Amino acid sequence: MPPIVKYITVNAPVPSLSDNLADIDRLKRALLTETAARPLSIPFAQVSNVAAAFRQAKFSGTAVINDLGERLELVDFVENPGPLAAMALDLGSTHLEASLLDLRSGDTLAHTHGENSQIAFGADILSRIHFAARPGGLVRLHEAVIGNINDLARQLARQAALPPENIRALAVSGNPTMTHLFLNLNPGHICREPYIPLINAPDICYGRELGLDIHPAAPVFIMPGVGSYFGGDLISGIMASGIDEQEHTSMLIDVGTNAEVVLGNRDWLMACAGAAGPALEGGVARMGMRAGAGAIEHINITPGSGVVKYETIDGSPARGICGSGIIDLVASLYLTGIIDLRGKFRPAGDQDGRLRKGAEGWSYMVVPGTETADGRAIELNQVDLDAMMRSKAAMYAILTTLVSQVGVSFAELDKIYVAGAFGRHISPRRAITLGMLPDLPLETYVPIGNSSLRGAEKALLSGRARVRCQEIRRNITYIELNVNQEFMLRFSGAKFIPHTDRSLFPSVP
């Protein structure tokens, strides 16, 4: 099935006294062979421009058609068509990532990323929902993210040597709150029982309606969501992993602001989401940061000597520690006896003199200030450690609650796909040691990168993908963990390393 926008070559007869058809009617007649199966219309805002361009091209050139599924829209006419550029966007709460595709070839023309400036109004989703309730708050949040997206569009266009108005479509993949703020819709009910968004599956809108600096008639396709914590970014993940088309049962895990998990195969899908991500993203640990330049991604503490070895993502001086590094660190602290099974510091286990007691209690120096980018030591204190223990317990509780709902065991899973920076950098062995992930063979775990962006790209390139995301949405069963008592019991049992039931983790010493 075709991409969301396509080119159709037109060679129409020139008007004459014997053929006095109006310009727009002439263009529609010339397109009839290609468009007869579906209604073709021209948005009123584009009629004048299309007619003028058609006549200026002497009635021969290329029509630009938006493919909206059951209907087609004629939105432009060009003499010398270049790449058919469209933008895919991962609309994250802290970070935005975008790519520019040529819809004719499927090639990636450009790629960029940037921070979400909504952080200035609230570091997390809940605080932004509260800010949106203030007078003028929603508009400020909306304008902030639209400004960010326009910046990314200009960067992509510059890399591809195109004007931004030649970006002909946009596909957006984000969580429900981010989608609401992008559309200037009130997200207030998302965080209040019974946790109902204003909309889960928005219809197509246009660049001009949202103030986007792309073609004014560019269709904006928003990946549909399912529930208050289950948005289009997770639908994208399902499409990127392909679990909805596989015979065997697999799992998808995406950890960001929330931990979102899907279980299933081509016959059924079940999903849930919960708050297990902030400690891994830098939202809780004071030395935490997103995976990026200067972030420590891997750490090892040598048993016996206590010597610390670490790696930053780009090899530059350390600035902080990302989620995979925090997992490595806490697992190493446990294996060397510096913390106990409750996640509490043990001064007797400190072999290298890195554990110190201050006004706020014990802390462990990961990197001395002489080695960091800003001269400040990177430390893990007990508050950070407690937050990590809660996050790892929540993650395992989410996974066990989900599999228990359908009566399958972890051993029956064919693959566990791990998305995002969490999946790209994490060491499954260390996550198993903590009791964050189930104790399975390491080859079970498959990193799939930014699945949110990949899903948006698929939606741009294929009508079948756009239909598929709606099918996934209709076929999935969503479990609301906010009111799930089983989850709370499992969470309590997982607040030890690796777990209160050691038999669940036979490989962990």
Image: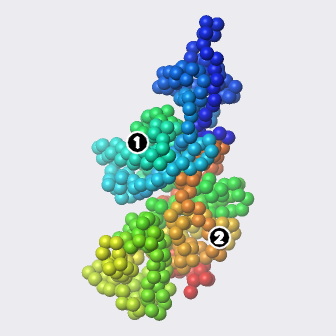
Asked whether residue 176 appears in the rendered view, the answer is: no
Residue shown at 54% from the left, 58% from the top: 450
Q: Is residue 26 above or below residue 131?
A: above
- Quarter of the image for the C terminus: give it: bottom right
Q: Secondary structure at mark 1?
A: loop
Residue shown at 59% from the left, 62% from the top: 448
Residue 444 is tagged as: 2
Foreground label between 2 and 1:
2
Can you tell which quarter of the image residue 24 is in?
top right
In this view, the residue farthest toward the top is: 17
Q: Front-most of 409 and 427?
A: 427
User: In x, y percent, where is residue 420?
Assistant: 52, 61
- Quarter of the image for the N terminus: give it: top right
Residue marked by disc 1 = 184
User: In x, y percent, where is residue 233?
Assistant: 53, 53
In this view, the residue farthest toward the right is: 247
**What is the three-letter code of the residue carrying label 1?**
Asn
